[in-house]
Amino acid sequence: MSAVSQYVHNIKDTVSTIFEGMAVTASHFMRKPYTVQYPDRMPVRVQDTLPFRYRGILDVDLEICTGCLACERACPIDCIVIVAEKDQQTRQLLLSQFDIDIAKCMYCGLCSEVCPTGSIHHTTEFEGADYSLESLIRRFVQDPVMAYKAKKGPETDPRIAPILNRGMAYLDQWAQPGGEKPPGEEPA
Amino acid sequence: MQTLIQNLIASGVFGKNPPRDLVAAIVVFVMSLVVFLAVALPFGGIVTWVERRVWARIQSRVGPNRVGPQGFLQWLADGIKIICKEDIIPDEADSRLFKMAPYLVMLAFILPWAVMPFSSSLILADLNVGILYMTAVTALTVVGVLMAGWASNNKWSLIGGVRSAAQIVSYEIPAGLSIFPVVLMTGTLSMQGIIRGQGWAPQHWFLFANPFTFVAANILYMSSLAEANRTPFDLPEAESELVAGFATEYSGWRYACFSMAEWGNLFIVGAIITTLFLGGWQFPHVTNNVVAMNVLEVITFTVKVLFLVFVSMWIRATLPRVRIDQLTTACWKYFVPISFVNMIGTAVWVAIWPDGNVAIGYIMFAGAIVLGAVFIQRVIYYLRRSRMEVYLNPTI
Amino acid sequence: MSTLRTEEMTLNMGPQHPSTHGVLRFVVRADGEVMREAIPDVGYLHRSIEKIAEKVGYRGFMPYTDRVDYVCAMFTNQGWGMACEKLAGIEVPKRGEYCRVIAAEFNRIASHLLSVGAMAMDIGAMTPFAHVIREREMINDLIEELCGARLTFNYMRIGGVAWDLPPGWREKALKYLDHFDPILEEYNALISWNKIYVERLANVGVITPAEAINYNLVGPNLRACGIKWDIRKDIPYSVYPEFEFEVPVGNGQWGKLGDSMDRYVVRIREMAESSKILRQALQKIPPGAVLAKVVRNFKPPAGECQIRVESGRGDMGWYLVSDGTGYPWRVHVRTGSFAAMGIIQKLSAGLMIADLVTLIASLDVIAPEIDR
């Protein structure tokens, strides 16, 4: 008798669980899909919707680069190549090469963490595909430029001040070792 | 068909005294071409588009919507792409059998269209063994699949082909046995005869005629799904195990033959169930205009078949795959005994009520409506429970 | 009647296959549908990550730990961070530990979701995989706001975490958890209690408790055999003692104890427990710093240390030997998937080929973790 009851139980189980499962899928059929129809059927560009901390392709603001080579040392995969030499006549630090190989970069953020002014930072760009490998080496220095010297007080040059403010705001997102929490975070 | 030919000759389209047999042959030939090229082939393509959109909505995605309005031309683009691909035949494969296998599977897909009852007078050949012919001819797929599996010279394809042969041959039995209750109730095997034995209203359908035919309809549907290699019985082409099963080594238009036969088989499965259990093309007699009635009947038939096709896709999206030993267990231990019980039960029923029992039809129809209401209540429960308002990304 | 001569087939479930989780290879000796033996062949994803550690140093190795197990990147980060901190005697501030636990538990939910969805897809149901990816997308959006990346997070540092919770993040996380709990019920209705699913999973790949311990299994694989061993409870680390949660254990109610269904259900229940931990952590998180002060060129004293972290795949062991310079002498990672590969060969005798796929999926084998 138990074989017969097991048989009937199997049939009942199958039918009832399949019924439940079909109800779940039918409910999903009625819902709005969760797809973002990138890149054309979107109200704004995707790059503008990504958060500020997004670790996209690297970008360098040469106006505020101090030539300290901290990012080159911090990179675990050696994708940053900087040549900064002291010019003999003017005794200024001159940046003659700043290359980042974004094909090698692993978007870890260790370089932007150690930059003192926030000149090397991650953007929200992620569309870097191209047809040639050479174009993936971003060369940020065309003519040799002077490195930036941080001033004692606030920066007064109107061209550089907004860039510096954006760089420092970017750095403020990172946690300060042993210090207070960054501005804007509410207490628990 | 014969009335159509007589009307055409009488209207003088073919001249004064045409030889009847030649005219009949030409008309039938042209109609077969029309049915195949204009109905079967496009259907095989369009149903891929429908399946992808239905699947995508069930999976919270959108599906193809770029090629043509709402992505409607996606199947054309895919078809053109696949026939432009290189036709690769493996070196060690048995090339004659390798080439013949898709043709056999396509043959099993094309032949049933000859007895497809689109309306009361639109049927290519109203054979008096219509349903038997259809069952017999859809079983040709076994030969094609086995050939494909063996001739590919690939162990995985061989496993897929052998599994499929075992599956199709096993599920022929419950499918055939489930046709018997209907034949017992009408006494004829012809498609039009079976449809004329039902009425247009649901309580006159054979689905609700007695509880045995209700169960037989479900068993026939599931066995037909198993014969068409659809989930939950799609072991021969289990994507995650055997890549594409028996069709792994096929590329280009040969693979398109297998694909199209599989999708097109959905229509044939739906047509068999509609004819036998859902009343076919029956529509209430609202006008005396023959052409208008035929059009309404064709629409009724198509709507019923498309609903069953939608249910097949829905089942495919919901259920996982069964293993080969569970499949044969289900067939021989569950489907076959239940089909025998149905057959005997219907025989007793027909002996007691030879003219049918409409009261039971009403009761079972009401029961089906209650079941539908319970289902909708479960769907609404899930819709309310897990709301997708949490779109954290504001671009959606 | 003379016996029919039969032959064994040798099949190759090669490195390119739609259902092995990553790049794995199995040489299967089968008698028709029933297997005699499935011999695993690993090494296709070996990237010498442990050797790279000796070149890049302590700080630079943190992004590499993401790649050891990219599905459970937070746990690997935490393991490496804890190993360096233990060697150098650094203490992580309280809020930093809470941030670590929150990130780790979100990652555990994401990892188990992927395992459940991939198993459903291998068995043949396509929709649970798409639903799981949708849920993971929501978690990825949350973590993207927190640390900037969606898969290889590099969130933790030696001494704490790199970013604090952004403003408004806690509310979003709690809203997500409110949305997530009914979804688990939906998964149960769609797949867990589905009769076909139960038939495919029950009594397949039964592992006895003694076998599990002998073969070094950890995590949900071990707990499914009835053994209650969870590093978070038995060798507590971080702030886990402050949270109330249970450790789900398999009980063999659908088949034998230790079959694939048990492993699957343990994972589903662990997701519910992670959700509980997350709610408590998000309520109780204290104010303060999240990163301890660590010198710029980090040189821990010479010595060795061993750390165990309960990752998505189980007890992940980190073994670090330092010689006093700025570069480690030897790093070794011990992962749960490596042991799971060993037991597949033993369990495969007598299974069908379809069951091999189920077995690999239920043991939640992730290929990069095996080869590193």
Image (spheres, helix red, strand yellow):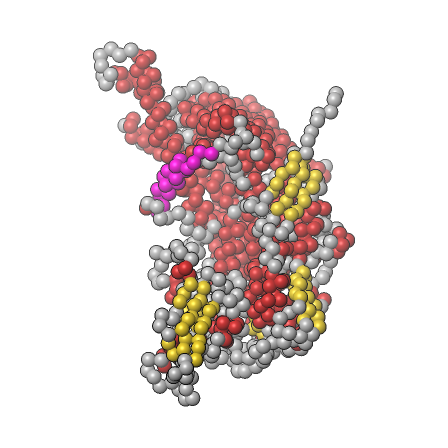
Task: Classify the position of the N terminus of chain B by image quarter.
Answer: top left
Between B9 and A81, the residue placed more toward the observer is: A81
The magenta span reads B70-88
Q: Residue furthest bottom?
A: A153
Between B46 and A45, the residue placed more toward the observer is: A45
Image height of B209 relative to C181, above or below: above
Residue located at (39% from left, 55% from top) = A131
Does the magenta stretch mainly form a helix, a strand or a loop? helix
- Magenta residue check for B79: yes
Image height of C261 relative to C229, above or below: above
Quarter-of-image position of residue C296 = bottom right
Residue located at (35% from left, 86% from top) = A156
Location of residue B117 in the rendering, given as x and y in whole percent from the top left corner: 40, 26
Task: Classify the position of the C terminus of chain B by image quarter.
Answer: bottom left
Q: Is residue B226 visible?
A: no
Q: How many numbered discs sit on the rendered protein?
A: 0
Location of residue C178 in the rendering, given as x and y in whole percent from the top left corner: 52, 64
Between A16 and B209, the residue placed more toward the observer is: A16
Location of residue B293 in the rendering, given as x and y in whole percent from the top left corner: 31, 29
Q: Residue furthest right?
A: C210
Q: Residue furthest front?
A: A88
Image height of C70 relative to B224, above or below: below
Residue located at (40% from left, 67% from top) = A139
Residue located at (34% from left, 20% from top) = B28
Q: Is residue B49 visible?
A: yes
